[in-house]
Image (spheres, grey):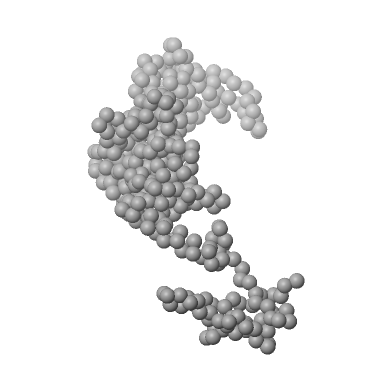
Amino acid sequence: MKVEIEALRSIEREKGISFDTVIDALEGALASAYKRQNGVTGEEARVVIDRTSGDVTVFAQELDDDGNIISEWVETPSDFGRIVAQTAKQVLMQRLREAEREITYGEYSGKEGDLVTGTVQIHDRGVTVLDLGNAEAVLPYAEQVPTERYEHGTLLRAYIVEVRRSIKGPQIICSRTHPNLVRELFFLEVPEIADGTVQIKAIARESGHRTKISVASTDPAVDPVGACVGVRGSRVRAIVEELSEEKIDIITWSEEPAEMVANALSPAKVSEVYLYPEDATALVVVPDYQLSLAIGREGQNARLAARLTGWRIDIRSESQFNEEQAAFQAAFERGEVDQYGNPVPNTASVGTEGEVATEGDLTTDGDLTTDGEVEAEAGTADAEGEHGTTVATAPTTVPPEG
């Protein structure tokens, strides 16, 4: 019995499966078909196909109780018969499909974290399927941008998040919301990023609305922001169109946290940045007319800036900041707070005998009562002045000294 080697070669070309894999699949299929024939003498069999001539040799095998081969002999049937040949064909096709799936899995498992381009094939019940040519990718509802519409036949780029094995072949999970989708698009559009001259330091994204990306240059002669924007905005414009008009802010990365926070709030202009490293908080002061721009719609600009920098950002207008500073200065001068804004403990009033006053109030003349209390008219002290009377509440009692 012989098989057509050229036919096996054509399967190799059409399916992209190696010739040895095709031969191994056919040998296994013929061995399985041989065991299903009537009147076979061996319990098991193995088939060898000559890679050059196509001659088929069947080796029948006898096994012991433990499954070990006791003896082996050549028993090549002259004809497998129609039913057995059909069985061999089914087994062969099944093994070829398994080989195809394994090849596809091996191809795409190495592409996790890469971009793929596919055609929208199915968009039903929140699940979108992309045809990649030799495989299909799934775009789950959670990985879809709410503001995008996926029409049948539309070409779409997506980011490969994960490749899983399944019974029906590899399952390729893609995303349109992942921040690294923006990163990979910049790698495609900006040669300076691809060759390492410009580096992407951080990305913060709210898909469908706005993305902030910080970049730095390893070459002092190259402007990282200008390289990403391109001539008349051509490079960033291509990315914006791919992301369905999502806004992109490109900022210069800085090692100085204060400068980085100020840059991250772009396009708003920042007056001052005060850092509190102990709780990773940055107090940002902006001009009054820039306050709404710095915060952004529903806090989006400030929120993305915080993600980009890793600092908690509190934003104040200049007038708000000046009012708070004036209030702090007044409280500090009254001794109510220390230089860090922490409340200062109240001091105690002491009677003539050194006893702690239990109801002590201070009179306008500062006289002490016989009970060791300090009196005050109506519980207050009047300070003379042309603008009226300043009222101060008397201090509460504290434990005695010493």
Taking 393 as reference, is 286 above or below it?
A: above
Q: Residue furthest right?
A: 402
The residue sitting at 49% across, 37% down in the picture is 255
Residue 401 at x, y percent in the picture? 72, 72
Question: Could you tell me which residue is drawn at 43 percent across and 51 percent down?
Answer: 284
Q: Which quadrant, please, contains the N terminus?
A: top left
Asked whether residue 268 is in view, the answer is yes
Please name whichever residue, 162 or 302, is drawn nearer the observer in this view of the structure. Answer: 302
| Image-based side of 353 in relation to 205, left or right | right
32 or 173, nearer to the observer: 173
Q: Is residue 73 above or below residue 95?
A: above
**Residue 134 visible here:** no
Along the viewing direction, whichever of 400 and 268 lies nearer the viewer: 400
- The image quadrant that residue 117 belongs to is top left
Q: Position of residue 194 (x, y in %)?
A: 39, 26
Q: Residue 294 in the image: x percent, y percent?
A: 35, 50
Q: At which x and y percent is residue 144?
A: 34, 46
Left or right of 147: which side holds 386?
A: right
Exactly how many numbered labels are in the figure?
0
In which quadrant will I find the C terminus? Answer: bottom right
Q: Nearer the viewer, residue 6 or 332?
A: 332
Tell me the residue at 26%/38% (across/down): 241
Above or below: residue 77 compared with residue 239: above
